[in-house]
Image (cartoon, helix red, strand yellow):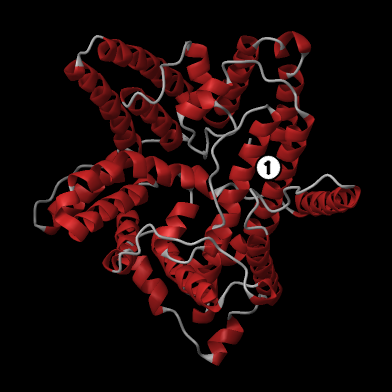
Amino acid sequence: MIVNSFNFLFFFIVVFLIYYIPWINKNGRRQNIWLLMASYFFYGVMDLKMLGLLAGVTVLYYYLGKLLKYEMERGNAREASIVKTSGIVVGVGILLYFKYLDFFISSAVELLNRIGLHVSWTAMHIIMPIGVSFFIFKLMSYLLEIHRERVQPADSLLDFSVYIAFFPTILSGPIDRPNKFLPQIQKPRRFNFDKAFDGLQQILWGMFTKMVVADNLDTITSAAWNFNTNSGVYMFLAALLTPIQLYADFDGYSNMAIGVAKILGLDIAKNFNHPLLARNVSDYWRRWHMSLTSWITDYVFTPLNIKFRNWGKVGLMLAITINLIVIGMWHGANWTYVLFGLYHSLLFIPLVLSDSFGKNKKLRAGRFGLPSGKDLFMMILTFLFVAFGQIIFFAPDITSIIDYLANFSWRIGSFMQGFEQIRQVALALLFSLTIIVIEWRTRDKEYAIQAKSRSYGDTLTRFMLLDLIIAIIIAKFGMSASQTFVYFNF
């Protein structure tokens, strides 16, 4: 039951109607009971076998939070540290088991075989729970925030369970922090028409970018790894389209999740801030998957940076490298994700050496409303670096990266063979250019079609635009089913 499906639409209509029934709407606890039932039903439909794991770790961390606060209030710093560390070990252990154990076994077998020690170990083929990376990070941040005295433990297991299992975010984020989310569900949520309409618009924009832009680009990018039938130019073009396709896909999901939450009267974390407009790699990571980047920056980079402070720029680069490897490995168990993190860390070297790390001026329009020449050059350069990084990110293995690059070619004959699907390519280029222009024009908005005013002219134009988007989405539904979201794999 993916978010951009008729099944989810029917599910959400039922959730919405009952959620705002006056008898339930007057009592925040009743709303939370209903939200939890809906969230567990939603997760059960997606991954019924792992519903017990979700419930079990939720109860465990709820009581760990209580115990941690109890030890802190008694002044038992050592015991409090043990409780916090235990929670982190459990969370990391769950990720290691479900996401990385098979990888470690197969890597160890390969290494031993290469040095002549033949072993018969076999991978366990462990099934990874859907959304495990997202809800485990929520659980760990809960304990870390309590230990840092930034949040009080949840008053009830019900509230905490809703925070962990909230159905719009459990599969692919955003990764909400308890500081912002828990206070919202401790009081009744009244229906707010303006907020709900804003959420509906954001859902429609998310569906458009996912179903119309990302799915059309996917026909190019997903086929590029077939080296035997595609030309080098086709593959080069696919590499340039991949960052746009991934952004349209993941940002599309995030906008839908944020929009659904708004309709339910809740504000959740923003996940993207126009990353296609980034002018360097540091700027890119501040704009891309912000809820994950900020999580790892707070809990990994900042402590490491403090620890390595006496090492100067070498210490800063070491902290950045570890931070980016963790971000890469968060996505899964593959050496390509480690290489992806290392690659991006290398892009930080010029920024660190020039003392430009962390410094970015606000984007401003220049002549004719376009970026300045310097900004445009830096955007294009950053985009090219990111596009190369996506080849590493999506490669099945390191050998495939080499094969992909080896097949780049500018031969005319190869070029013509690569455009057998010329309509798809032309459409993909058109969508890509359109998205980039929209990103620039709406860089000060939360999402592209967010309303600026409520004047009659603006309202009429907005309804015409929404009607057009709805018509395009319906037409897309009629032509083919939408692809699943890329980040469901992580």
Q: Which of 357 and 476 is in front in this view?
A: 357
The residue lying at 53 percent from left, 27 percent from top is 181
The residue furthest left is: 116
Q: Is residue 226 visible?
A: no
The residue lying at 43 percent from left, 55 percent from top is 285
The residue lying at 69 percent from left, 76 percent from top is 368
Place of residue 357 in the rendered image (x, y in percent of width and height, measured from the top left): 34, 60
Image quadrant for the N terminus? Answer: top right
Place of residue 3 in the rendered image (x, y in percent of width and height, measured from the top left): 65, 39
Where is 18 relative to 166, above or below? Answer: above
Name the residue beneath numbered marker 1.
Answer: 4
Image quadrant for the C terminus? Answer: top left
The residue lying at 51 percent from left, 90 percent from top is 411
Q: Can residue 460 be seen in this view?
A: yes
The residue furthest bottom is: 412
> Is 489 on the left-hand or right-hand side of 4?
left
Q: In which quarter of the image is residue 417?
A: bottom right
Q: Nearer the viewer, residue 416 or 194?
A: 194
Residue flagged by tag 1: what amino acid is it? Asn
Secondary element at image label 1: loop
Where is 276 relative to 460, above or below? Answer: below
Determine crowd level at label 1: few under 14, some 14-19, many 20+ residues with C-alpha closer than 10 A.
many
Place of residue 468 in the rendered image (x, y in percent of width and height, measured from the top left): 84, 54
